Image (cartoon, coloured by chain):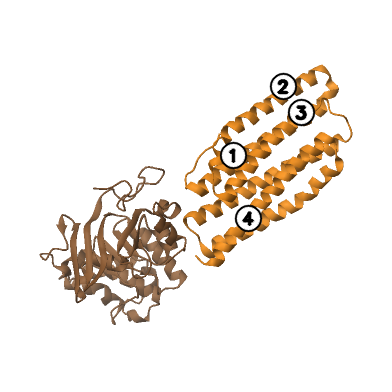
Chain colours: A orange, B brown
Amino acid sequence: MTEKFIEELDRLQADTFEMGQLAVGMLADSVKALKTQDIDLAQSVLEKKTDLAEMDLEIEKRALQLLTLYQPMATDMRKLATILKTITYLARIGRYGKDIANITIELGDQSHISKLVSIPLMSKMVGSMIEDSLEAFEEGDITKLADLGERDDEVDAMRYTILRECITYMMEDPKNISRCANYIMIARYLERCADHSCKIAEKVTYMVTGEHVEIR
Amino acid sequence: MTKENGPMAEGPASNGYLKVGNGKYALDLRKVNVHYGSTHAIKDVSMRIRENAATAFIGPSGCGKSTLLRCLNRMNDEIVGCKTTGTIMFKGTNILSNKVDPVALRHTVGMVFQKPNPFPTSIYKNITFGPKVHGIRGKDELDEIVERTLKDSALWEEVKDRLDDPAMSLSGGQQQRLCIARALAVEPDIILMDEPCSALDPIATSKIEDLITELKERYTVVIVTHNMQQAARVSDFTGFMFLGRLVEFGRTTPLFEKPRKTLTEKYITGRFG
């Protein structure tokens, strides 16, 4: 394969990692905006949606071009396949950030029902899962992914805790229903983001080892 | 005999990959060595080639893939100073034995070359040449052979109304398919192809590739190609050769997706060669 191909593949990998940082940042900022009721920050997350979509499309185009021009094999093919799948997962993660930002704007200055501890904690857990998957992708080292399945279980348990907590608030006072429904949605979005991080990790494992694995 | 990770291993047989061929082996090569004078061109190659399947040899120029292919119908005998040792079992006989008549062998192990090489005569006579040598004289029988082989080589519809035209009037791709039809006319068991598409345009190449896919249903096909994508498209098994050795041999899909040897990985990803 030509040096040009190898250079372009390396660039694509770096750009996919950068797209990942953007998506993780959108998710983290959206939860931070929710917690602090910072409408400006939520607005900035919405504005990043276009950048994310553009990166998604651009990387996909370049990856397809490389496939067409060079028809790569073995590790190169596996890396390209991983990039093509990963950008879709990252786009979904970023869009969940956008959805949470929209909820934040919708809630406006209505005070939270409680101190809102669980959702930021869950967001932190999910964010570290995505970052570890991205680092494994960038470095080609899957050792950090060994416990991702267990961490996904913890996230699932956290979502269930938030659900039960919200049901309690809703039963206490029907005025809480609207806000709690939003919290339940946010917990669901975060839980889906954790699932996406596991899917990225599966693809990274395939990229590195050639083996298809299933993480939860 | 078959080591788990040795070059003879075919990789996972039931690991999500369709069963290929009829499960039997057409050729069994054991410690095949070829010397051209002082040059050791093929070194201790052992492998088994599946019946009714397509097997491809890939590797950089000079790695010995064409030499190995030519061992399979003793074409190397024609090269002065070439010495082949080891055994190649075909239908219970070691075809490298002096007792085997190479001409008779080539009836059952046909060959198609890199450049189309039709005889300078009509399309019809190109195909009937071999059967006539075998004593078939009846017009009806020869007509039947011509129609059958031209249909088998996907050329019939294009030439059925001009069988007496010179073979040289055909396009390169048609000439190559005529050469395949000519090889089929003597009813071989095995068809060897030495870079059969390297002189053809993409459309003609695609027709030959489709043809190989059809032919392997009834024949054992062994193909040498420089085009790795072609090997990946048409073959069920692939052998990667380097400096006269068979580095890796196995099912095509896993070999191109996740080769077991670093050398194979480097070659198919273009890191060398």
Chain where mark 1 sits:
A
Report which residue position mark 1 lands on: A198
User: Pointers 2 and 3 in contact (CB under 8 A)?
Assistant: no
- Helix, strand or loop at mark 4: helix
Chain where mark 3 sits:
A
Alpha-carbon span between mark 2 and mark 4? 41 Å
In the image, residue A2 above or below residue A193 = below
Rendered image: mark on residue A117? 3
Alpha-carbon span between mark 2 and mark 3? 14 Å
Chain where mark 4 sits:
A
Compare marks 2 and 4 and give the one earlier in the sequence: 4
Chain where mark 2 sits:
A
In the image, residue B230 above or below residue A203 = below
Alpha-carbon span between mark 2 and mark 1? 25 Å
Is disc 1 surrounded by few (<14), some (14 to 19) or many (20+) residues within 10 Å? many
The percent position of residue B107, horizontal first and vertical second, equals 20, 66
**Residue B145: which quarter of the image?**
bottom left
**Residue A117: which quarter of the image?**
top right
Q: Name the amino acid type tagged 1.
A: Cys
Compare marks 2 and 1 and give the one earlier in the sequence: 2
Relative side of A101 to B32, left or right = right
Alpha-carbon span between mark 3 and mark 4? 34 Å
Q: Nearer the viewer, mark 1 or mark 3?
A: 3
Report which residue position mark 4 lands on: A14
Q: Name the amino acid type tagged 3.
A: Val
Q: Residue at x 72, y 21 (%)?
A: A164
Report which residue position mark 2 lands on: A164
Q: Residue at x 34, y 81 (%)?
A: B168
Q: Nearer the viewer, mark 2 or mark 3?
A: 3
The percent position of residue A49, horizontal first and vertical second, equals 76, 49
